[in-house]
Image: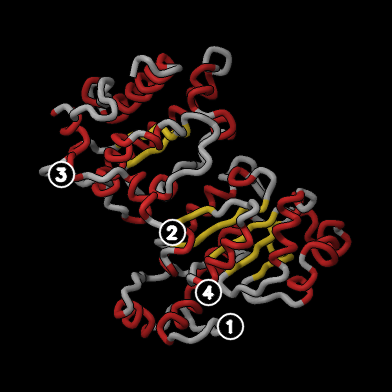
Amino acid sequence: MAHLPFYDHFKTFIGDLGARVAGQLGISIEDAYFVDENIETGDLWSDQLKNAIMNCKASIALYSPNYFTREWCGKEFQVLLGRSKKEGGVTGIIPVRWVKDISGLPASAAQVQYQDGKLPQEYSTRGMRQVVALRATNVGLYEDVLDVLADRVVAAAENQHLAPLTELDFEAVTSAWQVDEATTEPSHTRGNISKTCFVFLAKEGWDWKPYDQERAGIGALSQKISGDLGLRYEEIPCDATLTQKLKETFENDVPTVLFLDPKSLEEAPILQSMQHYDETYYLNCATIVPWESEVEDAIDEDSRWLALQTTVCPQKVETPPPFHEWRTIFSHTSLEERTATLIEQIRSRLMKQLMSSQSKLPTFRPAADPGLSGTAAALGIVTGSLPSLGSPDR
């Protein structure tokens, strides 16, 4: 690996992160981490690397375009996915955004939580490699990111998110990237009611913070809600493919939540996406608009609300379908609780539909219906106890 660009930044980052993990776990730095710097595509795995892949308690994956082109990286990733217990949607893999642009992630990599609301926004906009490079002038940012990542590694190790292996046939392992390529069905169409897709219709996208800037952004909040409900999480980007992907989630019974930032209505991709959405009627979709608390008593005069009524989504605002919250969310608590409630209401409706094989009609059934779980199991649908949700104003 010594020939790779910015290798010094890599060594600095791994060394500093390893030191933090060692300190928190009370072990030596030598026992805290292992890096095999000699393996390349086509090389045999050393016994030391094989042992590490079979028995490590956590694994750092540096997400970059280069990482997803290497077969041995995909093999390693596949082994770790197989070892992950996946309880509550977590794994023992801790992805690091090594460069700022990691668009077009393979499906297997995208399913692992690679964002964290505790991480500074500069980390997402610059990437870890640049954060390391700038540590001399912004050591606080570097230290903050290291602390969050170290906490995640320690949590994965202490909670035993990776089950050890007793044997491993490396030659028989198929790269996770090849597995993704062999899967022709788009990931957002899979999972039915065991997952939720999210769309962030905001200029800041995943990092948008509707309320307190000290809280996690909308992406991290969505992942938290999914985890609390025992569901898989997936983001659908707001781009030219959104209209088609929403149609596909509808056809495949995948609950989907659209979060709309009223401050971003003038952004062309967002405006056009919502105008196209206004022409559809998908009962697997929830749309939520979080408003600032100070406009609650004057929303009727708010220019953004008027735009929603007249030019953005006039049909859906005038006659709201189920699961649409156009002007009822004015706090972080309300946003989180109402989102969770809507997801469970959509899942309940879809569950009844899947059990009855009826066409997609607006039918409802309480999620707590004791008959749902047994019938779902017969259909091969994994369900669990649903949380008790309080009033959005609680």
Where residue 165 is drawn, which disc sits there?
3
Q: Earlier in the sequence, mark 1 or mark 3?
A: 3
Q: Residue 315 placed where, x, y %?
A: 77, 73
The residue at which mark 2 appears reads as 228
Residue in the picture at 63% in, 61% down:
243
Of residue 315 and residue 252, the one placed in the foreground of this image is 252
Residue in the picture at 46% in, 58% down:
186
Residue in the picture at 34% in, 70% down:
382
The residue at which mark 4 appears reads as 345
Is 97 placed above or below 366 here? above
View extreme (right): residue: 301
Q: Are marks 1 and 3 in contact (CB under 8 Å)?
A: no
Residue in the picture at 54% in, 34% down:
101
Residue 116 visible in this rendered orientation of the protein: yes
Whole-Å distance between the Cαs marked 2 and 4?
15 Å
Q: Are marks 2 and 3 in contact (CB under 8 Å)?
A: no
Q: Earlier in the sequence, mark 3 or mark 4?
A: 3
Find residue 305 and report its image quarter.
Answer: bottom right
Q: Earlier in the sequence, mark 2 or mark 4?
A: 2
Q: Please identify, in this view, whether the residue under mark 4 or under mark 1 is nearer the observer.
A: 1
Please state if 81 lies on the left or on the right of 110 as rendered.
Answer: left
